[in-house]
Image: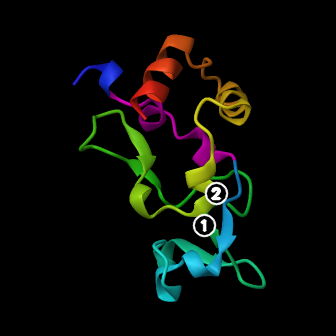
Amino acid sequence: MSSTDIHPCLTCGVCCQNYRVEFSVYELRSMGGTVPDELAHEAGSNRARMNGTQYRPVRCAALGPLPVVGADCVGCTIYDSRPRPCRDFPFASYGCHDTRAQFGLPPLEEAEVQHWQEAA
C-alpha cells in the first residue's frame, strides 16, 4: 500500500486532539445509537461527550493506532460508529488546516485534497 492509498486523516488525528465532541445521548448504543457508551459520559440535559475531549489537552478516547491500515496510521477506532460531530467535520476545511498548523503539520497539498474528494 503506498502513501497515496492512505487517506491523510489516517496519519493525522489532530482534530481528535483539539475539539470537544458533544452529541445527543440518543447516539449512544444504550439509547439505540452507535457510539459505545463506555467511550462517552453525560454532559448535561440529553447531551453526551466523548471521553478525553472535556479538558485540554484534548485526546478523544476513540483515537488510536490503526495497525491494519499501516504501521504509522492513527485514527478513529470507532469510525463506523462515530458521533455526528465527527461525521460532519469537513476534511481539508479551515478547521482541519488550522488544527494541523497548531500541531506543526503542513497544510494538505491541493492535489491530495482533490484526489480524496474525487474518491469520496
Three-letter code, disc 2: Pro
Q: Would you say 111 lies left or right of 80 here?
A: right
* Identity of the residue drawn at 30% across and 25% down: 5
Q: Tell me the residue that label 1 is attached to.
A: 50
* Identity of the residue drawn at 52% across and 21% down: 113
Total residue callouts = 2
Check the image and name the residue furthest to the right: 45
Circle 1 crowding by C-alpha within 10 Å: few under 14, some 14–19, many from 20 = many
Q: Tell me the residue that label 2 is attached to.
A: 85
* Identity of the residue drawn at 64% across and 57% down: 85
Dot 1: element: strand
Circle 2 crowding by C-alpha within 10 Å: few under 14, some 14–19, many from 20 = some
List x then y, in percent, for residue 24: 66, 75
Q: Nearer the viewer, residue 69 or 57?
A: 69
- Residue range in magenta is 6-18
Magenta stretch: includes residue 24: no
List x then y, in percent, for residue 64: 42, 51
The reply to whether callout 1 and callout 2 are in contact (CB within 8 Å) is: no
From what the image shows, is residue 38 above or below residue 96? below
List x then y, in percent, for residue 82: 50, 61
Calculate the distance from the C-alpha at mark 1 to the C-alpha at mark 2: 11 Å
The quadrant holding residue 101 is top right
* Front of the two marks 1 and 2: 2
* Identity of the residue drawn at 50% across and 19% down: 114
Q: Nearer the viewer, residue 62 or 115?
A: 115
From what the image shows, is residue 120 above or below residue 84? above
Q: Main secondary structure of the magenta part?
A: helix
**From the image, which quarter does the N terminus lie in?**
top left
Dot 2: element: helix
**From the image, which quarter does the C terminus lie in?**
top left
Q: Would you say 71 lies left or right of 17 here?
A: left
